[in-house]
Amino acid sequence: MKPVNVTDETFAEEVYSSDKPVLVDFWAKWCRPCLMMAPVLEEFAEEYADKMKVVKLDVDENPVIASKYRIMSIPTMGVFVEGKMVDKVIGFMPKERLVEKLLKYLK
């Protein structure tokens, strides 16, 4: 399952209402590290679809949510459990390192 694009309007439905943890990729089209992170997140989303939902939020097009969570640098991946942000991962990283950081949420 590929990452789902979310907006300020669809964020609550896709993230807060999810029955499993959600990894939110806060990104922008002009951000090189974000573009490098995209295939890593796609692979992660496919591999862990049964354990974690992955969504993408373009911070330029959706400033309300980005501002609410004080996203100051991108890429930032926010981990949401039961509708609350419980962790942040900032910057590019290979899939192995991402999995290592998220292991405690992949039940």
Image: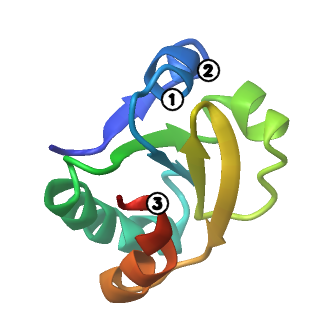
Determine whether label 1 and label 3 are within 8 Å by CB. Answer: no
Q: Residues within 10 Å of mark 3 (few under 14, many from 20)?
A: some
On the rendered image, what quadrant is the N terminus found in? top left
Amino acid found under the numbered disc labelled 3: Tyr
Above or below: residue 65 compared with residue 9 = below
Amino acid found under the numbered disc labelled 1: Val
**Identity of the residue drawn at 57% across and 18% down:** 12
Above or below: residue 107 compared with residue 58 = below
**Identity of the residue drawn at 37% across and 86% down:** 94
Q: Position of residue 52 (x, y in %)?
A: 34, 49
**Identity of the residue drawn at 56% across and 42% down:** 81
Nearest to viewer (mark 3 / mark 2): 3
Closer-to-camera residue (39/51): 51
Q: Which residue is mark 1?
A: 15
Q: SS for tag 1?
A: helix
Q: Which residue is mark 2?
A: 8
Image-quadrant location for residue 39: bottom left
Q: Position of residue 5 (x, y in %)?
A: 38, 33
Q: Earlier in the sequence, mark 3 or mark 2?
A: 2
Q: SS for tag 3?
A: helix
Nearest to viewer (mark 1 / mark 3): 3
Image-quadrant location for residue 21: top left
Q: Position of residue 22 (x, y in %)?
A: 46, 43
Q: CA distance from mark 1 to mark 2?
A: 11 Å
Q: Residues within 10 Å of mark 2 (few under 14, many from 20)?
A: some
Q: Earlier in the sequence, mark 1 or mark 2?
A: 2
**Identity of the residue drawn at 67% across and 63% down:** 88
Q: Which residue is mark 3?
A: 105
Amino acid found under the numbered disc labelled 2: Asp
Q: CA distance from mark 1 to mark 3?
A: 15 Å
